[in-house]
Image (tube, rainbow, N blue to C red):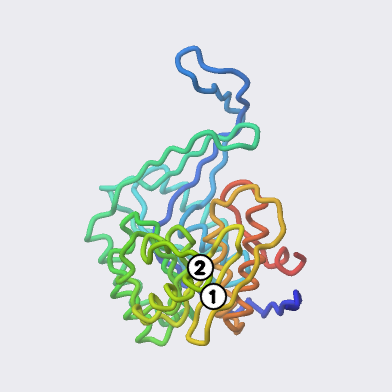
């Protein structure tokens, strides 16, 4: 297969991202001794960093690929929510966050020493129904101003009305790409394409022993849910695309893997931007594979820019 890929003009693509946002915090330091209190390393924190995570990282990836992006989500009325809003505003994304007094903004705190993650601490709770209903109302109003919808599901409660969102988007003629979570995929029925990773797919269809079994299971799921396509990311084994025309595989790029966190965000964002810009599904998958190879070579939640994609 030729390695030459056509990258379309992405400047006119309009993407609407809906889902669970979070704030990724990083504490970097040195761990040179063991605590006298317990057999754990002592980290002397030397610097801190914050980055958008979850659906916010998906939106940022879309923007860095040249698309115009709107983001709908829920945050808490707290310091983390304000930090996330500021980060997203600086990235050029048109974000609409509903502040819910009853929740804390989801925060993932990672402690890094000598370029290795030692610990992750999560702070989270689910939003209430009233705020989610308000988000659905805005989704209904915004759907006509986009070319494609991404539903970024991290299982934090921000997509309670996903079934209705899919129905509204498809009724408006908009493709829907979803990054699924959990073991019940019936709520994604009617979407255009799902992008589970290998472990996520196994939760739903069970294990497989070879590529033929994987294709049979993936195709059965695609048909049962009424999907046009299913893209399975397979880590070091690359990614596989399943459509009514059959299966197509793309090998992983030979790169040093530094950090896989957020790679799934880059995959679905690249697929969405390329499809919205006129690329066919096969070419969009190959570009997404290339973008994923770029971000796993970076530390932490990261993006692939359109210039990096062109020069890869």
In front of the other: 210 or 59: 210
Residue at the image position 60 percent from the left and 73 percent from the top: 249
- Residue 193 horizontal side relative to residue 163, left or right: right
83 relative to 283, above or below: above
Under circle 1, the secondary element is strand
Under circle 2, the secondary element is strand
Q: Position of residue 61 (x, y in %)?
A: 57, 62
Q: Position of residue 247 (x, y in %)?
A: 54, 79
Report if residue 299 is visible in the image.
yes
Residue at the image position 45 percent from the left and 14 percent from the top: 37
120 relative to 255, above or below: above
Q: Position of residue 30 (x, y in %)?
A: 63, 26
Q: Which mark is residue 232?
A: 2
Report if residue 149 is visible in the image.
no
Residue at the image position 51 percent from the left and 41 percent from the top: 25
Residue at the image position 56 percent from the left and 79 percent from the top: 275
Q: Quadrant of the N terminus?
A: bottom right
Q: Which mark is residue 230?
A: none
Q: Are marks 2 and 1 in contact (CB under 8 Å)?
A: yes
Distance Cα–Cα, label 2 vs label 1: 6 Å
Q: Which residue is mark 1?
A: 241
Return the disc, 2 or 1, that comes first in the chain's sequence: 2
Q: Position of residue 190 (x, y in %)?
A: 35, 80
In front of the other: 17 or 30: 30
Which residue is farthest top?
36
In front of the other: 29 or 87: 29
Classed neighbour count for the residue bearing mark 2: other residues with Cα under 10 Å, few (<14), some (14–19), many (≥20):
many
């Amino acid at each position: 297969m030729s390695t030459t890929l056509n990258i379309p003009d992405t400047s006119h693509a309009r993407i609407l991202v809906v889902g669970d946002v979070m704030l990724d915090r990083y504490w970097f330091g040195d761990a040179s001794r063991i605590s006298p209190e317990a057999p754990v390393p002592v980290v002397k924190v030397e610097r801190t960093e914050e980055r958008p995570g979850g659906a916010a990282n998906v939106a940022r990836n879309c923007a860095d690929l040249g698309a115009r992006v709107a983001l709908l989500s829920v945050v808490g009325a707290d310091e983390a929510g304000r930090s996330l809003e500021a980060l997203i505003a600086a990235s050029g994304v048109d974000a609409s966050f509903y502040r819910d007094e009853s929740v804390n903004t989801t925060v993932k705190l990672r402690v890094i020493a000598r370029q290795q993650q030692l610990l992750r601490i999560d702070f989270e709770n689910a939003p209430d129904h009233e705020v989610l209903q308000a988000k659905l109302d805005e989704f209904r109003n915004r759907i006509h101003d986009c070319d494609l919808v991404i539903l970024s599901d991290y299982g934090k409660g921000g997509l309670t009305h996903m079934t209705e969102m899919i129905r509204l988007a498809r009724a408006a003629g908009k493709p829907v790409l979803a990054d699924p979570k959990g073991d019940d995929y019936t709520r994604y029925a009617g979407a255009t394409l799902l992008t589970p990773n290998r472990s996520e797919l196994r939760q739903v269809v069970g294990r497989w022993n070879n590529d033929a079994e994987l294709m049979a299971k993936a195709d059965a799921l695609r048909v049962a849910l009424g999907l046009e396509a299913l893209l399975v990311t397979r880590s070091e084994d690359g990614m596989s695309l399943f459509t009514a025309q059959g299966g197509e595989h793309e090998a992983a790029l030979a790169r040093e893997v530094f950090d896989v966190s957020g790679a799934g965000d880059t995959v679905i964002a690249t697929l969405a931007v390329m499809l919205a810009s006129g690329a066919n599904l096969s070419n969009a998958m190959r570009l997404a594979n290339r973008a994923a190879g770029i971000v796993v070579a970076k530390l932490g939640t990261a993006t692939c820019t359109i210039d990096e994609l062109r020069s890869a």
